[in-house]
Amino acid sequence: AAVAAAMIWAGNADPAALHPGVVPLVAPVLPLWPAAAVLLGLLPAVVAPVPPSPTGFEEQV
């Protein structure tokens, strides 16, 4: 929900930044706030603990 709110806020604050032009074709500038919102959304994937291995499975070396 925080990521969606940050993206909505970024879209309202500077709508042109989230809709780059296509002529001439250039790489768009990545605004700071939308990039931070995406990184905030990826944070749970980084900080989540690794799930335990299935029961009865042992790693063979």
Image (cartoon, rainbow, N blue to C red):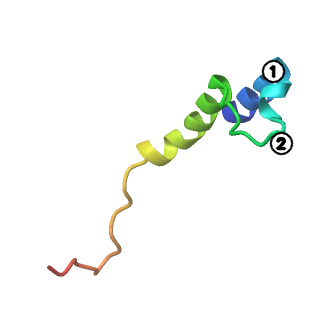
Q: CA distance from mark 2 to mark 1?
A: 18 Å
**As drawn, which residue projects farthest toward the left?**
61
Q: Amino acid at mark 2?
A: Val
- From the top left corner, tell me how far across and down residue 43 is, in percent: 50, 39
Q: Nearer the viewer, mark 2 or mark 1?
A: 2
Instruction: State the residue position of label 2.
Output: 22
State the quadrant of the N terminus: top right
Mark 2 crowd level (few <14, some 14–19, many ≥20, 10 Å Cα)? few
Residue at 62% over, 24% down: 32
Of callouts 2 and 1, which one flags the residue occurring earlier in the amino acid sequence? 1
Residue 13: which quarter of the image? top right
Residue at 65% over, 24% down: 33
Mark 1 crowd level (few <14, some 14–19, many ≥20, 10 Å Cα)? few
Kindly check if marks 2 and 1 are in contact, taking CB atoms under 8 A apart as contact. no
Q: Say which mark, if any, is on residue 14.
A: 1
Front residue of 24 and 12: 24
Say above or below: 20 vs 56: above
Residue 37: which quarter of the image? top right
- From the top left corner, tell me how far across and down residue 10 is, in percent: 76, 24
Along the horizontal axis of the image, is 35 left or right of 21? left
State the quadrant of the C terminus: bottom left
Label 1: state its secondary structure.
Answer: loop
Along the horizontal axis of the image, is 52 left or right of 43? left
**As drawn, which residue projects farthest toward the front?**
24
Q: Amino acid at mark 1?
A: Asp
Q: Say which mark, if any, is on residue 54.
A: none
Say above or below: 35 vs 12: below
Front residue of 45 and 26: 26
Residue at 49% over, 48% down: 45
